[in-house]
Amino acid sequence: MEISFDHHGHVTVAAIAGSLDALTAPQLIEALNQIIAEGHNRLVADMSRVDYTSSAGLRALLGALKEARTQGGDLRLAGAQESVKKVLELSGFTSILKFFPDAAAAVASFSG
Amino acid sequence: MLQREGIGVDMVVGCSGGSLFSALIALGYDAGAMEQMTLRLWARGITGKLYYPSLLRAALPRLFGFNQRFGLVDDRPIMTSLHEAFGDKTFADTQFPLYLAATDMQTGERVLLKEGRLVDAIRASIAIPILFRPWEVGGRLLIDGGAADPLPVSVAIREQCDIIIAMGFESPYIRQYGSLTHLVSQATSIMINNLLKSTYAFYNLAHHAEIVPIIPELERRIDLGDAHQIPYLIEKGQQAAETQLPYLRRLLASTKP
């Protein structure tokens, strides 16, 4: 898994690529916690290059969501591939956080 | 797939229709044998015959008597198939721990069956309300395990499994209704589909165990007696399993000492 961050004003886009699973979750958790600790709590997770997610990956995202909201911000998801989106729907993620078709729309939503 | 890849299993938990295959897996049957048994035992029309006394009891309850042991479908063909498949085998005959989930009809709570005759446990676990008579096991009147817990991963979590392969599916919804059983089936599907998703969501996030989902997408409606659709179901299940294989291989490789 690869993750990189790009700042768009007060919103930070985390571009994630690869598989979010038990093997890569620790890396994701560390990276997201770090960025939130630096004060960047308005996050967009660009999932367009994520090809797989497991329960461990979902827990990592949930942890970041909780932390960001505790800090007064939010984590929003963007561009999930169909297979990943199905898992997110099945696991109830679509009912507890906001989804957008792409990162640009997700970034813009923080201005609304 | 698991057999082909040499992936061993430490325990099996089954619910509803899954109880049949869970029991076969726990007894040590290989995939080919299970497929052949399914095709032979789940013959077309196995659930197609109505139990006419039930119709009379439903229409004229005071005259013919009505109680909770009600089922619209004649379950004798299913019982014949179950006896042929499992005989008098019990949970003690399994090669590793097997748990089958049913639902207590009086209290609504999940009942975990882990001893006694497999025929009785499976019959209880598949007892779809209204369609099949509830089945008594251990003094409790039991119905389909899906009514309480359609994806009992909690059992595997409780038994401290670190990697859980969760197999299930959402029942496709009926588009045209031609009978009372269609209506009952649709209502049941709506409730169980939502309960399955809720269960999966909760346990996915509540515990550290890695839950690998094998949840095939069914594009067509499969009715209970649609034995001719078994090859389609097997194919869809295989496809869903294969998509999880790359990650499963990496995960298992990482846990090897």
Image (cartoon, rainbow, N blue to C red):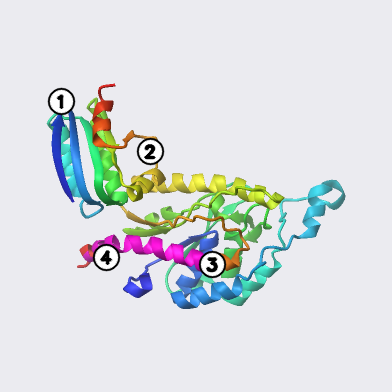
Query: Disc 2 designates what residue?
Result: A94
> Where residue B38 sits in the image (x, y, percent)?
55, 72
* Extreme residue toward the top, this view: A112
Chain bearing mark 4:
B
Viewer-nearest residue: A81 or A72: A81
| Disc 3 to disc 2, C-alpha distance | 32 Å
Apparent side of residue A36 relative to residue B171 in the rendered image (left or right): left
Residue at mark 3 to residue at mark 4: CA–CA distance: 28 Å
Q: Tell me where residue A46 sits by quadrant.
A: top left
Q: Residue at x 50, y 44 (%)?
A: B194
Q: Earlier in the sequence, mark 2 or mark 1?
A: 1
Prevailing secondary structure of the magenta residues: helix
Q: Which mark is residue B230?
A: 3
- In-image side of B177 versus B14 (left or right): right
Q: Tag 2, which secondary structure? A: helix
State the CA–CA distance, disc 2 to disc 1. Answer: 26 Å
Q: Identify which amino acid the numbered label 4 is placed on.
A: Arg
- The answer to whether residue B248 is magenta is yes
Q: Residue at x 61, y 66 (%)?
A: B120
Q: Are marks 3 and 1 in contact (CB under 8 Å)?
A: no
Secondary structure beneath dot 4 equals helix
Task: Name the residue rendered at 36%, 40% in the picture.
Answer: A93
Circles 3 and 1 on the same subunit: no
As helix, strand or loop, the secondary structure at mark 3 comes to: helix
Which range is magenta? B231-253
In front: mark 2 or mark 1? 1
Disc nearest the viewer among 3 and 2: 3
Residue position for label 4 = B249
The numbered mark at residue A9 is 1
